[in-house]
Amino acid sequence: MTDNSVLLDIVKTQMPFGKYKGRMIADLPESYLVWFKQQGFPKGKLGMMLETMYEIQLNGLEYLLKPLRT
């Protein structure tokens, strides 16, 4: 999996459960991602996407996602 494909997945994948079910991973609020960081990210691809989005927000890199949104 390339870095670009991870970023594409983040902007095209909806959160499958919880308070923000149906919201795109890229649009999740920072507080929700911080909660996952504290509780532990889910296993598998979803957890990897959530953790990547957490790091993107933590480092102010949201601009990387803008060209990928369609």
Image (cartoon, grey):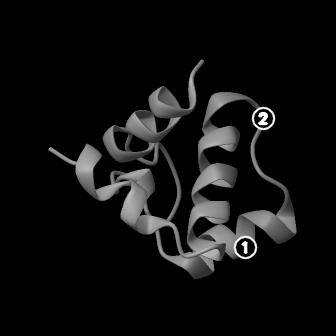
Q: Nearer the viewer, residue 16 or 2?
A: 2
Residue under the point 43% across and 34% down: 9
Which residue sits furthest bottom?
A: 31
Residue 4 image point, x, y percent: 47, 32
Residue 18 image point, x, y percent: 53, 58
Local SS, label 1: helix
Q: Is residue 70 left or right of residue 47?
A: left
Q: Quadrant of the N terminus?
A: top right
- Res. 24 mark: none
**Residue count near mark 2 (Cα–Cα under 10 Å), binned few <14, some 14–19, many ≥20:** few
Q: Nearer the viewer, residue 50 or 67?
A: 67
Circle 2: residue type: Lys
Circle 1: residue type: Trp
Residue under the point 64% across and 63% down: 54
Q: Is residue 38 above or below residue 49?
A: below
Residue 58 image point, x, y percent: 65, 75
Q: Quadrant of the C terminus?
A: top left
Instruction: Give the distance between the C-alpha atoms of the residues marked 1 and 2, in whole angstroms.
Output: 15 Å
Residue under the point 51% across and 67% down: 61
Q: Which residue is mark 2?
A: 43
Which residue sits furthest left?
A: 70
Rendered image quadrant of residue 49: top right
Q: Is residue 58 left or right of residue 6?
A: right
| Contact flag, marks 1 and 2 (Cβ < 8 Å) | no
Q: Nearer the viewer, residue 7 or 39?
A: 7
Sequence-first disc among 1 and 2: 1
| Number of numbered discs | 2
Q: Which residue is mark 1?
A: 35
Q: Is residue 57 left or right of residue 43?
A: left
